[in-house]
Amino acid sequence: EVQLVQSGAEVKKTGESLKISCEGSGYRFHNYWIGWVRQMPGKGLEWMGIIWPGDSDTRYSPSFQGQVTISVDKSINTAYLQWSSLKASDTAMYFCARHKDVDSSNYYFAYWGQGTLVTVSS
Amino acid sequence: EIVLTQSPGTLSLSPGERATLSCRASQRVFSNYLAWYQQRPGQPPRLLIYGASSRATGIPDRFSGSGSGTDFTLTISRVEPEDFAVYFCQKYGSSPPNTFGQGTKLEIK
């Protein structure tokens, strides 16, 4: 069974750094794109970017390029989303999700993590 | 970047009624790579439809998707109480960003 398990909720101050995680299990981790999706309070879904664990090839949405860093440690089947300096506007739920399979015709998110709530205050 | 516009923003229906949700793209969606997701409060999204019209595993047949090019529709033939949720469309493929629509909230009338 494919599972994506995310790290727990975080409460941080503006200007602090943060790295949240997403551990995959039940499949060959390095053979599937993993993505991150932001959902601000009461709002819709925003596609942030994806990473190929096999070689760390990463694609960002222009809206998030330079604002966050997506990385992976394939030795422990874990993807990361990190910020170097948080802003109050980063307050949101963040989901990791996996593509259905390796064919681009199936690059929809068939599997989702439970979400990590990040709260940033001054 | 393709922009997806969903309508209506909110749809108020009674159980048993038919729901029709629209998703319009600013450009043609390549090969109709269009997915629909359902999100209930406090839960991650759940895949319903991919390829514009194919139901995901375990999705009831009251959910159906249609459309091509720039205009797509999600239909729920008879809304059940558990269907009241928010629905998102997404274009996908090998040319990111694979953007989402802003969502349609299906609420009880």
Image (cartoon, coloured by chain):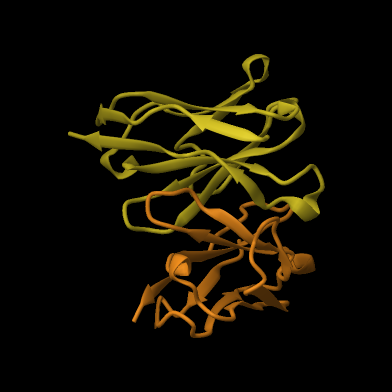
Chain colours: A yellow, B orange
Taking the image as shown, residue B53 lies to the left or right of residue A15, namely right
User: Residue B46 or B28: which is nearer the viewer?
Assistant: B46
Q: Where on the picture, by quarter, is residue B92?
A: bottom right
**Residue at x 67%, y 71% (from the top left corner):** B61
Where residue B55 sits in the image (x, y, percent)? 70, 64
Image quarter (top left, top right, bottom left or bottom right) of the C terminus of chain B? bottom left
Whether residue A17 can be seen here: yes
**Vertical position of residue B74 compared to residue A100: above or below:** below
**Vertical position of residue A110 compared to residue A15: above or below:** below
**Vertical position of residue A113 compared to residue B52: above or below:** above
Taking the image as shown, residue B55 lies to the left or right of residue A24, namely right
**Residue at x 49%, y 73% (from the top left corner):** B80
Where residue B91 sits in the image (x, y, percent)? 65, 62
Taking the view exactly as shown, the residue that stands out farthest to the top is: A75
**Vertical position of residue B107 compared to residue B39: above or below:** below
Where residue B18 sits in the image (x, y, percent)? 53, 84
**Residue at x 56%, y 67% (from the top left corner):** B3
User: Residue A56 or A31: which is nearer the viewer?
Assistant: A31
Taking the image as shown, residue B76 lies to the left or right of residue B108, namely right
Image quarter (top left, top right, bottom left or bottom right) of the N terminus of chain B? bottom right
Whether residue B102 can be seen here: no
